[in-house]
Image (cartoon, rainbow, N blue to C red):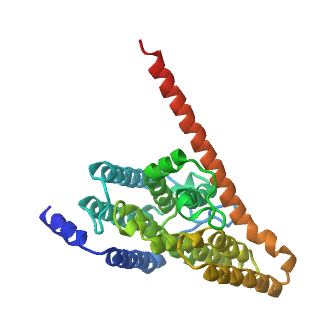
Amino acid sequence: MTLFTSASQALGRSRPGVVLAAGVAGAAVLTGLIWLLGDRLETVALRPDQGAAWYYWKLPEPTFWTRLSAWAGYAAHQVAFWWLIHRGRTAARGRDAGLRPVNVAALAVNVGFVLLHVLQTHLFYDGLAQDVSIFSSQGSVVLLLVVVLILENRRRGLFFGRPAPIGAEVAGFARRYHGYLFAWAAVYTFWYHPAVATGGHLIGFFYLFLLLLQGSLFRTGAHTARWWTLTLELLVVVHGTLVAVMTSGPDGLWPMFLFGFLGVFVITQMHGLGLPVAVRWVLAGAYTGSLVVVHAVRGDLAGAAGLAVRIPAIEYALAGLIALLLWAALRATRLITNGRGHSRP
């Protein structure tokens, strides 16, 4: 306990930049560990790939113990992280520059469960993918990115600096409870995959470790550092594009991911950085020019716009749908609560 207290006090005096640099280095080390151990898993026999809806990295014949190891590990990780987020929300108000003891505990818990999942993979192999759809894993990260759009709507707007008509009640609810959703998205997606060392997995694990880092830094100055949060949003550009190249080759759909996610940057994300208007015009021009050049080289100039708008259209449609559902749920809750209050004698 004394060692933990001393570490917490030392980290509590650290500046946000130092904390983030150490956290990124730690994420790289954990990713490197998965890479170093990856050769041990290459002899595991797997079924042939069966298409886009098929997740390749799962055992042909799972057992009770392989399933239990994955689901029990995930459940323990999820509950522990949620509990620490709850403690962080209720134990103290305000925001500190450095880390509080609960932040140090969250970092330690996440590192511990990452190591546990690596061990579980090498003993039992399977992750949650054996029992749930691949689209649930992909959808959880998309949901995280979409909720960020709602959270940041008032500060940077949704369309070229202009806020969407999302009410303060909805935005406030999302801001109060988004940590639980983001923690679920990161932990669930992490345990969905076995800790194998393909290029796509390693890129994804590094990204997930950064999301777990961000989730552990609640109520600190690092948690709201604008360039850091934007970096987390933009890393999906790197991940999505590289994985698309690895899986479908240079002639595949990687431009859809590259220009789709960068389109969200041009339409929304860059307007929260305080950049001069001229700089934003330059970035928008560079984006448009690159889009035209890439599709011209590929001989598909006519399809450039269609591919580029798919991901932004999905994200903005989901943002509107989620905001509407939250508004309806909050309104229904208020009506029910008021009705009960009026019915009391």
Q: Is residue 263 above or below residue 148?
A: below
Which residue occupies the foreground of this view, 33 or 98?
A: 98
Q: Identify the image quadrant of residue 341.
A: top left
| Residue at the image point whose x is 48% and y is 47% from the top | 173
Compared with residue 111, is residue 35 higher up or lower down, i.e. above or below?
A: below
Residue found farthest to the left: 2
- On the image, the x and y values in percent for residue 39 come to 48, 79
Rendered view: 173 above or below 18: above
- Residue pushed farthest top? 345
Visible in this render: residue 115?
yes
In the visual, does 23 lie left or right of 150?
A: left
Q: Nearer the viewer, residue 142 or 126?
A: 142
Horizontal arrangement in the rendering, residue 304 relative to residue 110 (left or right): right
Residue 159 is situated, as x and y percent measured from the top left of the image, at 66, 64
Q: Quadrant of the N terminus?
A: bottom left
Name the residue rendered at 51%, 22% in the picture.
339
User: For this rendering, which residue is in front, 205 or 343?
Assistant: 343
Q: Position of residue 151 (x, y in %)?
A: 52, 57
Q: Residue at x 42, y 54 (%)?
A: 69
